[in-house]
Image (cartoon, rainbow, N blue to C red):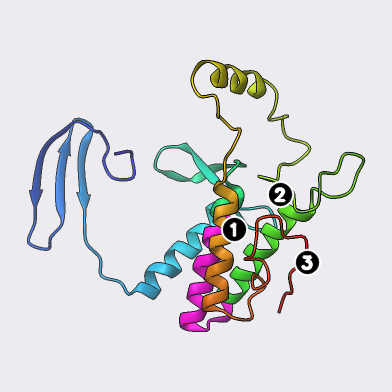
């Protein structure tokens, strides 16, 4: 279960107290899982705080993976890019569109716009230069030029996996376009003037969307 819930996966006994909390004895110590009442707004605020502090990456706020240097210790953590940066950011942006449609909170609107700009950057960053791809070609993630080249060693492993296990490994992965289309459809339905309004007709949209 990981350090979030239990100090050890060797569960030896469980007891439930009068308040509905669970006391769990494990090989590594005792854990207490308690209940705390909160409103949906309070829960959302807690997650937003954690997202901004630990997960949002770069000035665009990409929803990326975060790893703790030490299990259970939030004081030190590492962020890294993945090929799902666009997908998770799309889902996050769609959620903020729902939040704005329901609450009209300016903070939700601002977060939705930031997510949109992050996704637009994945499209525009590929343009220009001597080897620019066709318009509409979307980057999977953003990585600093100071970081290690992610292709070193990876391409060989991918080719080996493709030849020995899965012939379509990383040949066709429609996850990011699906996420982008989902976010655009959500925004169009819940927030008619959202910056996603003109992006829901295809994954290779070449028109610069209108931001409001």
Q: Are marks 2 and 3 in contact (CB under 8 Å)?
A: no
On the image, the x and y values in percent for residue 145 come to 78, 38
Label 3 sits on residue: 208
Is 191 within the magenta?
A: no
Lower sequence index among marks 2 and 3: 2
Residue 19 image offset from top left, x and y in percent: 12, 63
The disc, 2 or 1, on the residue closer to the chain's N-terminal end is 2
Crowding around mark 1 (Cα neighbors within 10 Å: few <14, some 14 to 19, many 20+) is: many
Residue 110 location, quadrant = bottom right
- Residue identifier under label 2: 138
Q: Is 196 on the left-hand or right-hand side of 48?
A: right
**Residue marked by disc 1:** 180
Observer-nearest of 121 and 200: 200
Q: Are marks 2 and 1 in contact (CB under 8 Å)?
A: yes
Mark 2–mark 3 distance (CA, rounded to whole Å): 13 Å
Q: Is residue 22 left or right of residue 166?
A: left
153 and 46: which is toward the camera: 153
- Specify whether 38 is left or right of 54: left
Q: Mark 3 and mark 1: span between their CA atoms?
A: 15 Å
Residue, far right = 130
Residue 181 image-quadrant placement? bottom right
Q: Is residue 104 magenta?
A: yes
Q: What is the span of residues highlighted in magenta in the rendered image?
A: 89-107
Q: How many marks?
A: 3
Quadrant for the N terminus, please.
top left
**Which residue lies at the image location 63% right of the left edge and 63% below the top edge?**
115
Where is residue 5? Give x, y as percent: 28, 45
148 vs 102: above or below = above
């Amino acid at each position: 279960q990981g350090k979030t819930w239990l100090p050890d996966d060797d569960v030896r006994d469980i007891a439930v107290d009068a308040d509905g909390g669970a006391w769990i004895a494990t090989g590594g110590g005792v854990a207490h899982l308690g209940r705390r009442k909160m409103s949906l707004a309070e829960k959302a605020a807690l997650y937003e705080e954690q997202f901004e502090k630990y997960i949002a990456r770069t000035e665009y706020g990409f929803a990326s993976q975060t790893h703790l240097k030490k299990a259970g210790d939030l004081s030190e953590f590492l962020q890294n890019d993945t090929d799902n940066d666009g997908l998770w950011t799309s889902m996050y942006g769609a959620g903020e569109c729902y939040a704005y449609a329901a609450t009209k909170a300016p903070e939700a609107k601002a977060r939705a716009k930031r997510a949109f700009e992050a996704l637009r950057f994945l499209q525009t960053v590929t343009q220009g230069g001597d080897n620019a791809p066709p318009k509409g070609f979307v980057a999977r993630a953003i990585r600093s030029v100071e970081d290690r080249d992610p292709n070193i060693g990876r391409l060989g492993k991918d080719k080996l996996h493709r030849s020995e296990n899965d012939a379509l490994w990383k040949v066709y992965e429609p996850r990011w376009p699906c996420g982008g289309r989902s976010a655009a459809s959500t925004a169009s339905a819940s927030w008619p003037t959202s910056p996603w309004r003109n992006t829901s007709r295809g994954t290779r949209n070449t028109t610069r969307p209108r931001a409001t």
